[in-house]
Amino acid sequence: MGSLANELMEALELKTSFVIPIAGGIPVPESTVITWGIMAIVILLCIIFVRNLKVVPEGPQVYVEALVGFIYGFIGDLLGEKGKRYIPFLGTVLIYLGCANISGFFRVAPPTKDLNVTAGLAIISLFLIVFSGIREKGLKGYLFSYAEPMPMMIPVNLLELITRPLSLCMRLFGNILGGFVLMELITFAAPAIVPLPFSCYFDFFDGLLQAYVFVLLTSLFINESIE
């Protein structure tokens, strides 16, 4: 039992991959290195798949266009005409989160089990929500929107603004970390074939579902901000 706890604590520990020798040393966490790897793989795949594009798609181009069509259809339906300019960013977040969350299937620690990663994504989403509201309504109109439907609602509306990124951050972090812990326990108890079906659920289905939910909620918040 003690060895299980030790192995679990070691797996949950935020590891430093290397230290950049600048200003006394800047530690680079494992989650950052894995994120760089995901970025490199996605960029490489984009370069490969966009070569020799044809008017009538065939081969891998069919799947790429299906993915792009799904992203534009899914996010575009949520944001409407006014929010179409945010689809490329949200689509990028969806692809990144999808790749990051399923990395556990390949025995690579998901970067989203690091609270710093999910908090960073949530803060970026918050800035995008505020920016979209200011861009659509102007600074004065956006600030006055917090007094709707009556001035006494200002504290409640501000609290809601603050809790949105916290909700996005903790929901994503909690679900991915919970799935990671369960997979570590299952792998320790039955390391042969048993973990495979569980990994298909926790790493693939639940990982992709959490990416979908994160972008879904961010899109809804942006739509509310610009309407």
Image (tube, rainbow, N blue to C red):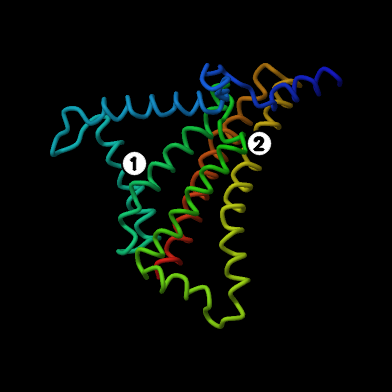
For image coordinates 44% across by 27% down, the residue present is 38
Which image quarter is the N terminus in? top right
For image coordinates 45% across by 60% down, the residue present is 130
- Disc on res. 39: none
Q: Give residue 224's quadrant in the image.
A: bottom left
User: How many C-alpha atoms fall within 10 Å of the one at disc 1: few (<14), some, or many (≥20)?
Assistant: some
Q: Say which element carries label 2.
A: helix
Query: Residue placed farthest to the front in the image?
Result: 23
Which image quarter is the C terminus in? bottom left
Q: How many marks?
A: 2
Residue 72 horizontal side relative to residue 133, left or right: left
Name the mark nearer the viewer: 2 or 1: 2
For image coordinates 55% across by 37% down, the residue present is 117
Residue indicated by mark 2: 177
Residue indicated by mark 1: 67
Distance of label 2 from label 1 (alpha carbons): 27 Å
> Is the residue 142 above or below the residue 118 in the image?
below
| Percent x, y of residue 204 | 53, 34
Closer-to-camera residue (197/78): 78
Q: Earlier in the sequence, mark 2 or mark 1?
A: 1
Q: Say which element carries label 1.
A: helix
User: How many C-alpha atoms fall within 10 Å of the one at disc 2: few (<14), some, or many (≥20)?
Assistant: many
> Tag 1: residue type?
Leu
Query: Residue placed farthest to the right in the image?
Result: 1
> Is the residue 128 above or below the residue 199 in the image?
below
For image coordinates 53% across by 42% down, the residue present is 120
